[in-house]
């Protein structure tokens, strides 16, 4: 369980998978959680899989930290990055749409991990 108190935001234990949602703003705390897990994993700790749902307008203009996310997928810290772009093509796609489309993955992480 993530806990929040004034001035603090603590990630869940490494044994708990994270389902992270960055709807286009506020990606920095999510990045910090994943960087923390990446550090622990590099030291040999067992880290549960995480998935990042990330929203942006256009992947070529504002999909921040794309290379970093790819590296985290390659290292196993992130199981998957699901990108929702609201200004590429039609219809617009938002993170809530991506979560609905990947409901199987969300359900798996909640129920089996």
Image (tube, rainbow, N blue to C red):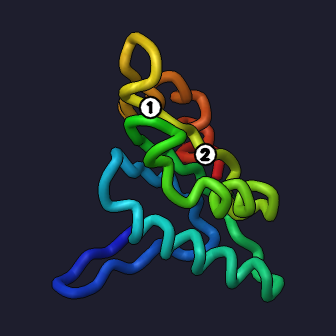
Where residue 48 appears, as percent x and y from the top left, is: 68, 63
Instruction: Determine the image quadrant of residue 14.
Output: bottom right
How far is mark 1 from mark 2, CA to CA?
A: 13 Å
- Left or right: residue 113 versus residue 73 is left
Q: Residues within 10 Å of mark 1 (few under 14, many from 20)?
A: many
Where residue 67 appears, as percent x and y from the top left, is: 67, 58
Q: What residue is at 37 percent from the left and 28 percent from the top?
A: 86
- Left or right: residue 98 versus residue 41 is left
Q: Residues within 10 Å of mark 2 (few under 14, many from 20)?
A: some
Q: Nearer the viewer, residue 71 or 75?
A: 71
Q: Is mark 2 on a helix, strand or loop?
A: strand
Q: Which of 44 and 36 is in front in this view?
A: 36
Q: What residue is at 57 percent from the left and 65 percent from the top?
A: 16
Instruction: Determine the image quadrant of residue 49.
Output: bottom right
Where residue 24 appears, as percent x and y from the top left, is: 34, 47
Mark 2 — residue? 81
Where residue 52 appears, as percent x and y from the top left, is: 53, 50
Instruction: Determine the image quadrant of residue 40.
Output: bottom right
Q: Is mark 1 on a helix, strand or loop?
A: strand
């Amino acid at each position: 369980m993530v806990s929040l108190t004034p001035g603090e935001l603590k990630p869940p234990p490494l044994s708990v998978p994270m389902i992270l949602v960055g709807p286009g703003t506020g990606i920095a705390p999510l990045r910090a959680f994943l960087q923390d897990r990446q550090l622990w994993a590099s030291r040999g700790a067992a880290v549960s899989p995480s998935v990042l749902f990330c929203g942006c307008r256009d992947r070529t203009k504002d999909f921040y930290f794309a290379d970093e996310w790819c590296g985290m997928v390659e290292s196993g810290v992130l199981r998957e990055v699901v990108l929702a772009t609201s200004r590429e093509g039609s219809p617009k796609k938002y993170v809530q749409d991506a979560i609905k489309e990947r409901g199987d993955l969300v359900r798996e992480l909640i129920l089996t991990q």
